[in-house]
């Protein structure tokens, strides 16, 4: 019978911690990107995107980084 070291976290704890860290990093990156581009959007749009980024953990930031920041760019 193998003894489990009580001081070492289980593998799933490490994996979930990494996933949470990546999700948090994406959210920070997306909010920073949104704040840099805020002048190109109406305030209601900025507020909506900020809520989506914060409330929808991974999909919100990825949506902003993939589509949202290109929407405010003028093509002239």
Image (cartoon, helix red, strand yellow):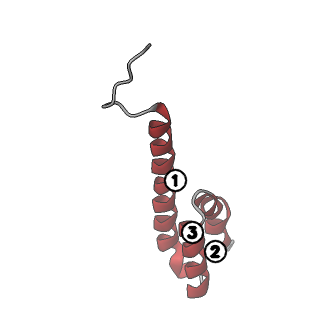
Q: For marks 2 and 1, give the one nearer the viewer.
A: 1
Vertical side of 18 occupied by 40: above or below: below
Residue that label 3 marks? 55
Asked if residue 53 is positioned above or below residue 1 in the image, the reply reads below
The spot of residue 22 in percent (x, y) is 49, 48
Residue sitting at x 51%, y 45%? 19
| In this view, 72 is above or below 42 | above
Task: Find residue 40 and report its horizontal and vertical position in percent.
Answer: 57, 79
Q: Residue at x 56, y 67 (%)?
A: 53
Residue 56 percent location from the top left of the image: 60, 64
Image quadrant in which the N terminus is located: top left
Which is more toward the observer, 61 or 39?
61
Q: Residue furthest bottom?
A: 43
* Residue designated by label 2: 72
Q: Residue at x 50, y 61 (%)?
A: 27
Front residue (pair 62, 72): 62
Judge by depth and name the residue closer to the eye, 60 or 66: 60
Is residue 66 shown left or right of residue 19? right
Left or right: residue 45 compared with residue 25: right
């Amino acid at each position: 019978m193998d003894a489990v070291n009580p001081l070492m976290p289980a593998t799933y704890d490490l994996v979930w911690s990494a996933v949470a860290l990546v999700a948090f990093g994406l959210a920070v990156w997306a909010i920073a990107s949104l704040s840099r581009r805020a002048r190109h959007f109406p305030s209601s749009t900025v507020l909506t995107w900020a809520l989506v980024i914060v409330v929808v953990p991974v999909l919100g930031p990825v949506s902003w980084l993939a589509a949202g920041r290109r929407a405010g760019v003028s093509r002239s």
